[in-house]
Image (cartoon, helix red, strand yellow):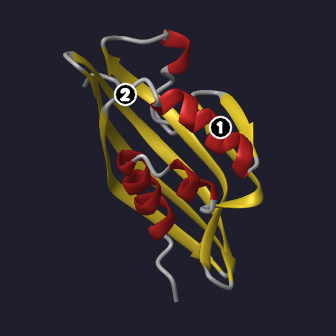
Amino acid sequence: MADPLRPLYTYLDRVDAGDIDAIGDLFTEDGVYDILHTEHRGPAEIVRYLRSALSAWERTSHHGSNPLVDVDGDTARVSASLYAYHARGETVWHFWGRYTQRLVRRDDGWAIAHMALIGIASDPPGDPAQFTGHPDRRPVEAP
């Protein structure tokens, strides 16, 4: 049985390798990628968006951690924390966020039916409307 974390880790690896076409293959034909509250539909549109966004950077390093995986038959849900480093010359942008994925099982392994990138923070700071924090975040009250 294929590992349901493989699509996430393959995505991170292919982004950093600049192999954007390979990312399209990770999604179902009607797959959706919701990036900071903007949806891109289908592998071709997702690849077009990523080419545009990533062309601004010479180097990137994306790190997924603390994955949670729930498998239910031929579907799975994955969530993981993200830290991403982006650089062009001396310009550097750090990003912290969370990925969520809904996967479906295919004959060749898992495919992404829906993926969301949820912003937590960046340095330098970005548009506050894009940084909504952990989707399950609750207020923490002082004792």
Q: Residue at x 64, y 27 (%)?
A: 37
The CA distance from mark 2 to mark 1 is 15 Å
Give the x, y percent position of residue 58: 32, 31
Q: Type of residue at label 1?
A: Arg
> 93 above or below 111?
above
> 134 above or below 21?
above
- Name the secondary structure under disc 2: loop
Residue topped by disc 2: 57
Residues packed near mark 1 inside 10 Å, few (<14), some (14 to 19) or many (20 plus): some
Q: Residue at x 63, y 44 (%)?
A: 47
Give the x, y percent position of residue 62: 33, 44
Report the residue that reaches farthest toward the right.
30
Left/right of residue 38 with respect to residue 57 in the rendered view: right
Nearer to me, 84 or 142: 84
> 72 above or below 29?
below
Q: Are marks 2 and 1 in contact (CB under 8 Å)?
A: no
On the rendered image, what quadrant is the C terminus found in? top left
Nearer to me, 116 or 91: 91
- Is residue 126 visible in the rendered image? The answer is yes
Residue topped by disc 1: 48
Q: Type of residue at label 2?
A: Trp
Residue 67: image quadrant is bottom left
